[in-house]
Structure formats: structure tokens, C-alpha cells
Amino acid sequence: METLLNIVIYLPLLGIPLILLIRNETSRKWIALLVTVLTFVASLPLMLSFDVAASGTPQFLTEGGRLMETLDIKYLVGLDGLSLLLFMLTTFMGPIVILSSWNSVKKHLAGYLSMLLLLQTASLGVFASLDLMVFYVFFELSLIPMYFLIGIWGGAGRIQATVKFFIYTLVGSLIMLVGLIYLGYDAGAAMGGGTTFTTDWRFLSGDMYTIGLVEQTYLFLAFALAFCIKVPLFPFHTWLPYAHTEAPTAGSVVLAAIMLKMGTYGLIRVCLPIFPNAFMEFAPWMATLAVIGIIYGALVAMVQKDVKKLVAYSSVSHLGFVVLGIFALNTVAVQGAIIQMINHGLSTGALFLIVGMIYDRRHTRMIKDFGGIAKKVPVFTVMFMIATLASIGLPGLNGFVGEFLILNGSFFSELYNNKVFAILAATGVILAAVYMLWMFQRVMFGPITNEENEKLVDLNGREIGLLVPLVIFMFWIGIHPVDFTKYSEAQVEELIEASQEKSMAVIEQSKLDEDLPDWTARFYDVDQVESQMASK
């Protein structure tokens, strides 16, 4: 299985030289589709053989040799409860992304398909990496294909969107690199044995390595900034609407379903286990930004005239829920955050596909240009309705599960003003119903006022085939979520418990009567810590 994991990660790359060598455009598309289908099929045994009871331990582990004798940087990949579902979502979306632009992309097709395959490998590498330097390489690699997808195959405003996307993400990544280098040398000194530098996640997140409170604060900020830009969390979100609006359909789907999750995944994978004290220190602030993002994203979405931009702002709101759940730091909320990442990928990915389908027919995304088309495209209407209801969290569909767990867990969080934040976040659910249903009603119902809409044709077999798998999972997760939450349950419990124990150890080491910062009083019972220290 270790070999199979590496095959899945790098199989998309094998299709690139074939696509570039073959001249026939149709053959190029079939090769890209075949490669992504094989990647998904090859990933299924990984999920089927995954040991749920041991989800906290990396499985299918591949560990290469060190880069240098004193530098413990090595190729280290594996899957655990945090990464498995996101890894599978990436392979699942591969064929859908290729099919989504089957007839719509005419310019530089070979380059376009190559960028999509490169982006899939980069995304799989991010979710499988267990060495932070390898994680960083894949994290940065994902920027390159998305840069070209928007810059070459995007809309009229693609240059501005590309520049904004690249500058935002690059600045965050460079700051994270500085933090990573400091972390690597600090951990290398702690590891000893001739090692001067290590970025092995297993050591960094374990109880054998702790970082002082002040260092944690700066390192947390360095990493969290890069991840919050990628999410994007308010107020770092301004690049997203431009990128989504100008990206081709496939680019928007990958951006929403996969790339944005790299940010929320990084917060759980890196920030929580390695900087637990700083994570708790900044939890109220992060939760505040998350709630602002939930409400702000919903309010701005409500006034959009472009359907695609409306869906883009809905992502700002929905991913605010994910961040809120992560920083609640209890099992229920973090479980909700993980499943909501998957839910957002399915529902919002479907919405971007639907927007692309109607754009291919009408070459407009303006809400005012539609109205009354439900009678002309009944299958499209049903698919659009299901994706819309899933996005607003209707019970029985996937969106409800994640939002319910996040709000439930947030209500009992000990790290921030739980009840106020949970109630404010709940208003985002109400606002989502308002802007999504209002948009759906204006696009699909009422009288036909534009004669171009009289000529609309319903979805063809390829388009139905794109949406049906997504709809199946929307209902499956909504009706029986335990089939998916079981993969991360054990790891979430272990991760939270280990992070709390590690944070307590740091507090003990800080000599409470002299070096303990004032902010820690919000999170720790000082008498309890002192009694534990006395007993030792």
C-alpha cells in the first residue's frame, strides 16, 4: 500500500508528457480523463484498507533518506484521519474537472490539461506530506498551475485577478517559510544526535518537542497568516472573488473544492499540534474573524448581480464556519470542521459546475439575464436546486451535518465566548438561505423576459454524469454521515488531548511565578498547574 500511495500522488504527472506529445485534441482529452479516472480508482484501496481505529497513526507510510546527514529533511508521506477524506476528495474531483471543460476550452488545450494534472499532484502531495518542508514544496507548487489557469484561460479581468491571487498567496508563503526555517533549526537542536535541522511532523507534533510561549506566538502568526490567506479568512479574502470570477470553470471548481481546504487543513495539521498554546491564545481572535467572515460573506453575496461572484462570496461565509469549528477545539466542532471541508467541496464545486454550464449556453452570468428558465431546463433545475439546498444546510443533505456539528461544538467551546459566537454564526445560516434561495428564484422562475432563454437546451449526458456523483454524496453524507466522520473521529480525539497535554507541559516549564504571560490565565487553572508541579 505504501507504493500505491506514491503511485496515486504521481500518476497524474505521467499523463503530462503524453498530452504534450500527442497532436490530436480529442486524444489529449481522453488521456487526461483516463489518467484521472485511474488515479481515483487506484486511491480506493487506500480508503478501503484504512484502519479507522488507528486513524491517529499515519498509515501507508513512505519514508525516504535524509537530504543531508545533519538536515533531517526527507520525503515522508502517509495518510491519517485528518488527510484521508481530503485526499480522496482530490482524486474524486479529478475526472469531474477534466469533463467539465470537455467542449469549452479551445485555446492551448495541451497546456490547460497539463496544468490541471500538475495541480492534482500538488494537491495530493499537500494532503499526504508528513514532513513540513515537503508539505511546503507541494503547497507552493499548487500556485503555479492555478496562476496559469487563471492568467491564460481566464476571463477579461484575468490579469488583475492573477496578480492579486499570486501576491497574496506568495507573501503569506514567504512569511511561513521564514517561520519554517526557524522551526526546523529549533527542532533540530532539540532532537540532537548530530541533527541540526528537522521538519518531521511526527517529531514536531509529539510530546518530545515543545516551544516556548513567546516563540510559539511568532511562529503561529507566521504559519496562520499563510493558511488564513489560503482559506481565505476575513480580511484576507479580497483575492478570492476576483480569482473565482475570472477563472475557467475547472479552475473555479478546483479552487473551491480542493485548494481553499489547504488553508483550513494547515491550521489543524500544523498550528494546533505544534503551537498549542498560541493556538489557544489566538482562538478568540480567530473565532471573531471567522464570525465576521460568515456574516460579511453572506451580506455581500446577497447584493451580487453575478451568479459566480455570489457563489464565490458564499465560500467566504461557509469557510468561516470551518475556521470557527477548528478554533472551538473540542471533538464535536473539529469533526464538524473536517466534514464541512468535504461538504463545501461537493456543494460549491457543483454550484460552480452549474454556473459554467449555463454560461456555456448563454455567455452571461448576470442574474437579470435569466428568469423563467425552469420550464425549459427541468433536469438542470433539479440539479441546481439540490446543490443550492445542500449549500444552505437543509437537513438530509450534507451541508446540514457540518454546520450542525460546528454550531453545537462552538456553543460549548471553552476558548471563546461560545454562546455569543454560536448565535452570531447561526445568523449566517439564515442569511445563506436568503441569498441562495433568492438567487435561485430569480434565475429559474418567473416569466421569461429574454428571448435568448427560449432557446435554452437541457443538460446533456456528459453534464448529468458530472453532477450525479456529487449529488449522490450530498445525500449520502446528509443521511448517514458516520460513514465519513468515522475516519477522523479517533484522530481528532487524540489530537485535541495531545495538544492540551503539550500546552500544559509548556505552561509548567515556564515557571508560573515569573515567566507565565498574563493571557494564559484565560485558559488554565493556575492552582491546578502548581499542584501538578509540586507533585513532581
Image: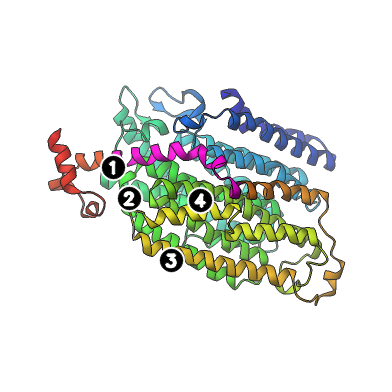
Q: What type is the residue that disc 4 sits on? A: Leu
Q: Residue 226 placed where, x, y %? A: 46, 50
Rate crowding at label 2 as few (under 14), some (14 to 19) or many (20 or more) other CA atoms within 10 Å: many
Q: Residue 137 placed where, x, y %? A: 52, 38
- The residue mark sitting in front, 4 or 2, is 2
Find residue 493 and report its image quarter. Answer: top left
Ranked by sequence position, the earlier of labels 3 and 4 is 4
Picture residue at 60% right of the left edge, 38% below the top = 88
Q: What type is the residue that disc 2 sits on? A: Met
The Cα atoms of the two marked residues, 3 and 2, are separated by: 21 Å
Rate crowding at label 3 as few (under 14), some (14 to 19) or many (20 or more) other CA atoms within 10 Å: some
Mark 1 lies on residue: 503
Mark 2 lies on residue: 280
Find residue 138 and report its image quarter. Answer: top right
Mark 4 lies on residue: 170
* Label 1 close to label 2 by CB (< 8 Å): yes
Q: Quadrant of the N terminus?
A: top right
Q: Is residue 363 left or right of residue 14?
A: right
**Residue 240 versus residue 112 in the image, above or below:** below
- The residue mark sitting in front, 4 or 1, is 1
Q: Is residue 182 left or right of residue 361?
A: left
Q: Which residues are magenta?
A: 477-501
**Residue 33 versus residue 428 in the image, above or below:** above
Q: Main secondary structure of the magenta part?
A: helix
